[in-house]
Image: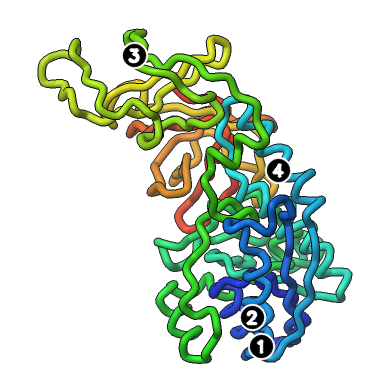
Amino acid sequence: MTQKQRVVVGLSGGVDSAVSAWLLKQQGHEVIGIFMKNWEDDDDSEYCSSRQDFLDAASVADVIGIEIEHVNFAADYKDRVFAEFLREYQAGRTPNPDVLCNAEIKFKAFLDHAMRLGAEKIATGHYARVREVGALGELGGQGHFQLLKGLDPLKDQSYFLHRLNQAQLSKTLFPVGELPKTEVRRIAAEINLPNAKKKDSTGICFIGERPFREFLNRYLSNTPGPIKDDRGRKLGEHVGLSFYTLGQRKGIGIGGVKDKGAPRGAGEHEPWFVARKDMAANTLYVVQGHDHPWLQQHHLVAQDLSWVAGTGPAVGAEGIAAKSRYRQADAPCAVTASSATEVALHFPQAQFAVTPGQSAVLYQGEVCLGGGVIGSAS
């Protein structure tokens, strides 16, 4: 891209968005920083760092030499993201708030605000890329926009961005998507950014890092109930089904329980994993061993679909792979059914603890096709 444009950058206070802003400024663009405040409950607590994040973002803007504006999207976040997040947990599913947050806040509320400021593009510090392909004259004079994986395989964030559409991608830049994280850190140190060594955030989008069970307990009503194994034996009590996710190993509260009746060789010290949640009976089922059949799924069905190109891959399309959770290698799969409302996938190699509420995201090589919310797995 050679023409100079007005680009509004979402400055989070982190190093990735800071380097993104600096790279755009170096390319000659008119760069404006926006800090998004999206959470106000207990904002003065030790876990919610928006005040410090804003100070970091403002310091970055000062070093780079750009203006920064503080914008409050807390009401949008609570209505569009957090309410849905709580609904999913209450229903026993495990949602991914970062996916919804990107679709509803960062690339909707933020994008709309940036356009009101006269921006031609927005930019964020995500590790992903946008590529325009196709002949001119298509899509009203533009090509077709693809969402690509970030070049650093350890940092690729296309999974969280899979709900972005053509209109959003046409306005979006991901300046660090072409770089490895090590290079981003190096640039930040070289230009003396104040947050060059700031650790990456791993908390809930905009809410921060905090004791998750304690946090959810303030918003959800939960009833304790039995924890049972795959033979129906009671092993303990759970604190509420919403607080557990399929495949979970730590924090179940039954560590050290020995399976005296296990078949010989089963290994009485194998770890326990959450395997099923019976909402009607308020019962949590756990099994021993990562490879237990209850934790291995070959099929999933996803709904609430969103395809980057507007339509999804056809049944039998070649070269399709999917992630059913973020920290997972792409798994080859076949599209066995597809409609406007749901897509069914078959995995030749069983997938571990496919979890309703999480996103199933489809890829064709480095191209992220989109995906949907997992409804069921078998």
The residue singled out by tag 2 in the image is 21
Residue in the image at 64% along x and 83% along y: 59
Residue 153 in sight: yes
Q: Distance between the residues labelled 1 and 3?
A: 58 Å
The residue singled out by tag 1 in the image is 25
Q: Distance between the residues labelled 2 and 1?
A: 6 Å
Q: Mark 4: which amino acid?
A: Phe
Q: How far apart are marks 3 and 2 (CA)?
A: 53 Å
The residue singled out by tag 3 in the image is 230
Q: Mark 2: which amino acid?
A: Ala
- State the SS at label 1: helix
- State the SS at label 2: helix
Question: Where's residue 175, x and y in %?
Answer: 58, 75
Question: Where's residue 19, x and y in %?
Answer: 57, 80
Q: Mark 1: which amino acid?
A: Lys
The residue singled out by tag 4 in the image is 82
Residue 339 in sight: no
